Image (cartoon, grey):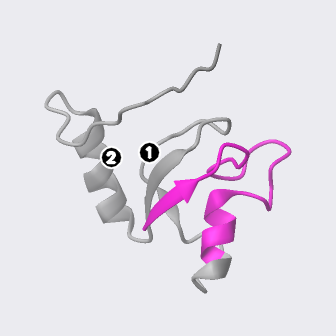
Amino acid sequence: YVCDKPSTVPVHQAGPYLANTLTHMVEGQENLEPRSLIPCHRIDRVTSGLTICCTNPAISRLIQGRMVNERKVVKKMYLARVLG
């Protein structure tokens, strides 16, 4: 799953954020089992952008490995728009 995360929503449950999380909302929308969606990378709560998630732990590890190894086959890019 590639999800367009808004800047007001955390990716997964943490601290005071228990139900209004990206994984919780996508699981409900796609009729997935609770806590079955695995985020493949981090993106801060106040950051919007595409987030890759999957339901298979082996695939999640594969994607994570492609984002963190020395070759970084998959790269993240941040774009900021500033006014003023």
Secondary structure state at the residue bearing disc 2: helix
| Label 1 residue SS | loop
Q: Which mark is residue 29?
A: none
Q: Which residues are magenta?
A: 1-27
Q: Is residue 43 visible?
A: yes
Inspect the image, locate mark 2, and give the three-letter code of the amino acid beneath it: Gln
Residue at the (28%, 34%) spot, across then down: 68
In this rendering, is residue 48 above or below 29?
above
Rendered location of residue 24, percent (x, y): 68, 66
Q: Is residue 10 above or below residue 68?
A: below
Does residue 12 lie above or below 54 as drawn?
A: above
CA gap, disc 2 and disc 1: 6 Å
Report whether 7 appears left or right of 81.
right
Q: Taking 75 as reference, is 17 above or below it?
A: below
Q: Position of residue 61 (x, y in %)?
A: 32, 53
Q: Residues within 10 Å of mark 1 (few under 14, many from 20)?
A: some
Position of the C terminus by quadrant: top right
Amino acid type of the residue that numbered disc 1 sits on in the rendered structure: His
Asked if residue 70 lies in the magenta stretch, the reply is no
- Residue at x 80%, y 49% (from the top left corner): 17
Residue that numbered label 1 is attached to: 41
Identify the residue shown where x is 44% and y is 45%.
41
Viewer-proximal residue among 49 and 41: 49
The residue that label 2 is drawn on is 64
Furthest toward the bottom, the residue is 31
Q: Residue at x 71, y 57 (%)?
A: 21
Q: In this view of the protein, which residue sits in the foreground, 36 or 41?
A: 41
Q: Say if mark 2 contacts mark 1, CB within 8 Å.
A: yes
